[in-house]
Amino acid sequence: VQLQAYGGGLVQAGGSLRLSCVVSGRTIRNKVMGWFRQVSGEEREFVAAIFLNNGRTYVKDSVKGRFTISGDNAKNTVYLQMNSLRPEDTATYYCALGEGTILSSIREPRAYDYWGQGTQVTVSS
């Protein structure tokens, strides 16, 4: 199973980016996909998750109204649309796939089975 995340870059505050995570070797249908981010020296933190069987999504409070997670089962791809970016959103963003992740665990990195390599997002002020 491989997860390939891309779409990061350098953007000014207030700008937008769309991250993509393409999964190969496993269908994402009926799985949970998550996005996490990590700043060097800090713990990896939850950003958003989606249940691909019913489309329900969950996002971190600090990004609500700015970030949207979505998925395309046919393309085996999950997206993270990030608008109104702030300098504090600067981090390496990782996508993850959970085989049997339950709702109460979606914010925990250990609940996911496979991870992408990360894509850097840098927001300048």
Image (cartoon, rainbow, N blue to C red):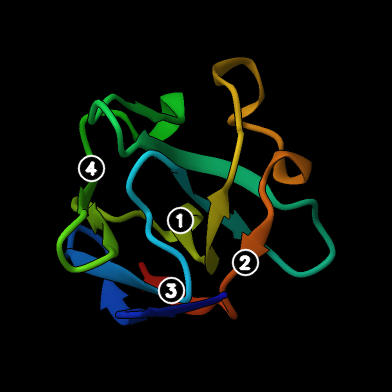
Q: Residues within 10 Å of mark 3 (few under 14, many from 20)?
A: many
Closest to the camera, between mark 3 and mark 2, is: 2
Q: Position of residue 31 (x, y in %)?
A: 44, 42
Q: Is residue 77 left or right of residue 93?
A: left
Residue type, numbered disc 1: Asp
Residue type, numbered disc 3: Val
Q: Is residue 31 left or right of residue 68?
A: right
What residue is pinned by disc 2?
115
Closest to the camera, between mark 4 and mark 3, is: 4
Residue 81: quadrant of the picture: bottom left
Say the numbered circle drawn on residue 121. 3
Q: Position of residue 13 (x, y in %)?
A: 27, 63
Find the distance from the CA under tag 1 to the CA under tag 3.
8 Å
What residue is pinned by disc 1?
89
Find the distance from the CA under tag 4 to the CA under tag 3.
16 Å
**Badge 2 or badge 4: first in the primary sequence:** 4
Q: Position of residue 64 (x, y in %)?
A: 30, 29
Say the numbered circle drawn on residue 68. 4
**Badge 3 or badge 2: first in the primary sequence:** 2
Closest to the camera, between mark 1 and mark 2, is: 2
Find the distance from the CA under tag 1 to the CA under tag 4.
14 Å
Identify the residue shown where x is 29% and y is 70%: 20
Q: Residues within 10 Å of mark 1 (few under 14, many from 20)?
A: many
Q: Residues within 10 Å of mark 2 (few under 14, many from 20)?
A: many
Residue 38: quadrant of the picture: bottom right
Depicted 44 relative to depicted 93: above or below: above
Find the distance from the CA under tag 1 to the CA under tag 2.
20 Å
**Badge 1 or badge 2: first in the primary sequence:** 1
